[in-house]
Image (spheres, rainbow, N blue to C red):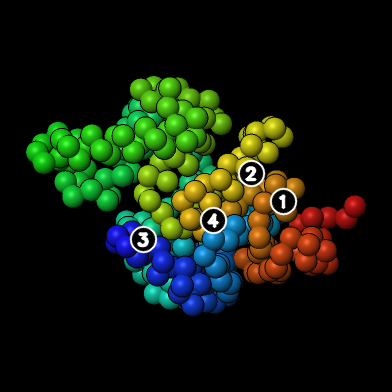
Amino acid sequence: MNQSEHNLESIKTSNYPMLEARELTRRFGGLIAVNQVSFTVSQGEIFGLIGPNGAGKTTLFNLVTGLIQPSSGQMLHRNEKISRQRPYQIATRGIARTFQNIRLFGNLTALENVTIAQHIHTRSGLFNGVLGLPPANQEERITQQKALELLDLVGLSDRSQEQAQNFAYGDQRRLEIARALALAPQVLLLDEPAAGMNPNEKQQLSEFIRQIRDQFNLTILLIEHHVPLVMGLCDRIAVLDFGQLIALGDPAKVRNDPAVIEAYLGGE
């Protein structure tokens, strides 16, 4: 058994959840954006996070990935506290994300966008890779090949040399997912991946998310406003309202929860 297989087996057999929030709270002055939120996410789950605008969903994602620090409470990854770690430290643990507002390097090609993300795992690092210094050359070729494979996975390999800023919105979304996968994550956070997509594209996205979950043995957290997509895709769903967790469970339970209907879903 090689090291990656050993690590994967360790994850599968661990009794600890992949992610755990313990009374996670974030205040911005007098505003409590996330208020004592607790939940666990198991290995291999597709876990949905829904709620009205301003409910605290993206703030919660930012707490998971270290972009902001909690005012109180803890975020754990495989039973180890990560709340005070920097974003790059959390990324190296295997937690990657996309953003509600796409954050690609617009002046770089699709291939360069994905390749850069992989340098977090290379020995030569980004500096040597960009300059083409030994021993980066061989490692860089391997890195670019992996990047091309990820672009092929999201259907963009034939546009690898195009600048990201020239891609249509939906293609930029797919490129951002490829870049997140380049971090070789255990956990992938997707912030409104279906935004701006038509119904057919949303169905394809749902199938694609299942595919990458199975192919890369991922645990996926998903923020999404399109309720039918969430209900059909996610194993469990958490609902936030004004920063508080008002419901948690499988789609059927959440769909029929009176508090969720009143706060978010609305009546018939």
Q: Which residue is mark 4?
A: 220
- What residue do we see at 88% from left, 55% from top? 267
Q: Position of residue 152 (x, y in %)?
A: 44, 32
CB atoms at circles 4 and 2 under 8 Å apart?
no
CB atoms at circles 1 and 2 under 8 Å apart?
yes
Q: Quadrant of the N terminus?
A: bottom left
Q: Position of residue 254 (x, y in %)?
A: 76, 64
- What residue do we see at 53% from left, 51% from top? 214
| Nearer-N-terminus badge (3/1) | 3
Q: Position of residue 110 (x, y in %)?
A: 38, 30
Considering every residue shown, the one lying at the far right of the view is: 268
| Nearer-N-terminus badge (1/2) | 2
Compute the Cα span from label 3 to label 4: 20 Å
Observer-nearest of 78 and 87: 78
Q: Which residue is mark 2?
A: 206
Residue 112 visible within the image = yes
CB atoms at circles 3 and 1 under 8 Å apart?
no
**SS label for mark 3:** helix
Q: Amino acid at mark 4?
A: Ile
Q: Amino acid at mark 3?
A: Glu
Q: Amino acid at mark 1?
A: Gly
Q: Which residue is mark 3?
A: 5
| Nearer-N-terminus badge (4/1) | 4
Compute the Cα span from label 1 to label 2: 8 Å
Q: Which residue is mark 1?
A: 232
To which quarter of the image does residue 179 belong?
Answer: top left
Q: Is residue 128 left or right of residue 229?
A: left
Observer-nearest of 14 and 93: 14
Q: Amino acid at mark 2?
A: Ser
